Amino acid sequence: MPTPSLDIIITGARKHNLKNITVRIPRHKITVITGVSGAGKSSLAFDTLFAEGQRRFLESLSTYARRFLGKIDRGSVDSIQGLAPAIAIDQQNASKSPRSTVATLTEIYDYFRIMWARMGVPHCPAHNKALQKYNPAELTRHLYEKGKDLAIIYSKNEVLDRVPLTEKNKTRLMDSIEKAYAESGGKIKIKTGNSTASYSNFPSCPDCDFSLKRELDPKNFSFNSHFGACETCQGIGDIYNKICPKCKGERLRPEFLAVKIDGKSISEACKLSISEAYEWFSNIPFDKTRKIIADPLLKEILGRMEFIINVGISYLGLNRRGDSLSGGEAQRLRLAGQIGSGLEGVLYVLDEPTIGLHQSDTKKLLDSLYKLRDLGNTIVVVEHDLEFIKASDYVVDLGPRAGEFGGEVVATGTPKEVSNAAAKFPHSLTIPYLAGKKTLCDLEHKVLDMNQGNNFFELSNLAKNNLKNISVKIPFGAITAISGVSGSGKSTLMECIYDYAEKKKKPVCFIDQTPINSSPRSTPVSYMSILEKLRDLFSKLPESKARGYDIGRFAYNKEGGRCEVCEGRGYQLIEMHFLSDVWELCEECKGKRYNKETLKILWKGKSIADILDMRIEVACEFFKNIAKIERPLQILKSIGLGYLRLGQATTTMSGGEIQRLKLAAELYRANSSKTIFLLDEPTTGLHLQDIQPLWNHLRELSNAGHAVVFVEHHSDMIKLADYEIELGPEGGEKGGYLMRS
């Protein structure tokens, strides 16, 4: 009898555009799922593999426990054998809470709180002097060491005892001190010689009445707890977007901000970057006794920091807010946490972890994933980066094209196997690039002389964030790439260019991958202003006029023409107790969004719902002689989005598709005046086959005289650019220098 395979076997996967595919994922290996944008990579990795793993886990819990957990969609799949517990590490923001920071998200701050509570030296917030504390035995020893003859002890400003400082009176002095502490609430005065000093059996300032009445506790250093949070801003650090006047943005009460280790408060330590903090904690000079307490804490703190350094984000500040992290930074932060957890036998599913990474950092990331794999885990990665694919153990290529023309397995094998046998995979658009038989090309590359002419703009003495007083020139009529390692200041430079354009009132357009709209009603035709033209076309038809239908009749988000059962959505939400919520096709309109009367209005034999269900490339031919509709559709098609449907919700589109949609809208609106186009990593989420049409459009913009500037790590895109500005040499404070331009 054959030994059963330990690999993960997916049979009959049909989620979204997947065509009933069967795939093998090798256990304890790094498998890359690649393919053109829209080929079905996320549908296989996240919506099938991860979703089924989560569903099985939830079904193993009691009905009571499931009430408190999120619901997971059941993947459309016949069977998955050998599936391990699954963890997804995707591009979603780490946290939307303004209280979350890099330190809290990585649990480093939890160890900070314990460390400052156990090892910190309290200081007076007003005088910055270390607080002093004497129990009766310590104070007795201290008074004898002063070498005076007599100690006069005061309790409540009255003399309690006069004790000659002789050997036989030590016990009497200690008893009197203890009695005085008890009567006066823990604070007394003692006169020796001609001087009177205050003493306390809890930490107190020698120069004022400030004191700490309780032992320090880790919760005193939490800005999420009323025990430690600033009373004015409640631990957020700001009030109505202005820095809190009480804590100056440091979130904690002043008495806890004054607790220090090696001269630093917990807030000052959090102002350091990961790399700076790693160096500082490694060199704190603890004595032998304190070192025994500190060592286990330092092991956890330095271990977590080391994992973060190894995934290429050592430049992040510990106090960086979680909601300000990019998707790539948030993903690698979670990845570092998973490596530190030491779990074994887990299936990890990652979504393009190389986004935002310089090639040098990609190698560090791969080393981290190798460690995770070697612990006995299986790793599935959705990825386009060729170097990453070559370094993986196994490749699954989906295609051959996007949307309904994709969803098939067009190549599988180790990177070496598929590269050496490219002819066996004629439908793969990835293998030719992987085998080096195809590359990006630009037939109009320009050689620029920045010392001649004035066809550029210049920014001088830039010192924002970590930029080191640099000056740069940006040419019009050319494509400029801003490159450098992660954290070197590229995004900051883009912000400076945008601010310059706004200040000088120059036309500027910033195109990134942030979602267009959180509403499922947002579609490519609504974003490109095509929907209004379609509604106008239908409202002017003779039958519409005869029925009295105006342009509002053909809006699916207004009463009148829409289906009222589903309110124009085409689907109805069905809540399933203890199971995933289900979107069911509306029984009334069958997904068409409009009511029956509206759908009776036809143009060239098609209703408005039929047109919204068309693919963009089909619609281009359908509207061939109507320029105001055809032109924007042709732009969408030429930029590589022809496979999308006109009425597809933008909430279902990838980041790469969103950015190309935004670019298409700008190309449609572009005028003759010189405009500065700023793009943030335009190749994110794009296959090399998709990058070529994108590049062609960027070249079209530069040829029209516009300045095209993008931040990019993709080596081919940087090579094709007419002009490069490289920042470095490292991230964070060690970056921000102009390396070359």
Image (spheres, grey):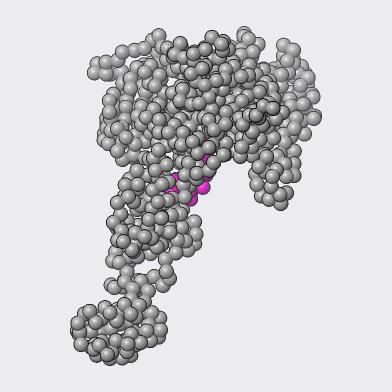
Whether 129 is among the magenta residues is no
The residue closer to the viewer here, 163 or 38, is 163
In magenta stretch: residue 90: yes
Q: Which residue is drawn at 53% across and 24% down?
A: 394
Q: Position of 305 compared to 208: left or right?
A: right
Q: Can residue 401 be seen in this view?
A: no
Asked which quadrant contains residue 379, the reply is top right
Q: Nearer the viewer, residue 475 or 694?
A: 694
Prevailing SS of the magenta stretch: loop
Query: Which of the pair 606/576 is nearer the observer?
Result: 576
Where is the C terminus found, in terms of image quarters?
top left
Question: Residue, x 38% and y 64% (percent of image)?
Answer: 255
Closer to us: 643 or 89: 89
> Looking at the image, which residue is at 77% across and 27% down?
589
Compared with residue 46, is residue 400 higher up or lower down, i.e. above or below?
above
| Rendering coords of residue 619 (x, y %) | 64, 14
The residue at the point 42 percent across, 37 percent down is 311
- Residue farthest front in this picture: 1
Image quadrant occupied by the N terminus: top right
| Residue 153 horizontal/vertical position (percent) | 30, 87
Q: Is residue 580 above or below residue 263?
A: above
Counting from the top left corner in percent of width and height, residue 671 is at 45, 18
Residue 306 visible, this orientation: yes
| Residue 82 position within the rendered picture, expressed as x and y whole percent measured from the top left | 64, 33
Q: What stretch is highlighted in magenta?
A: 89-103
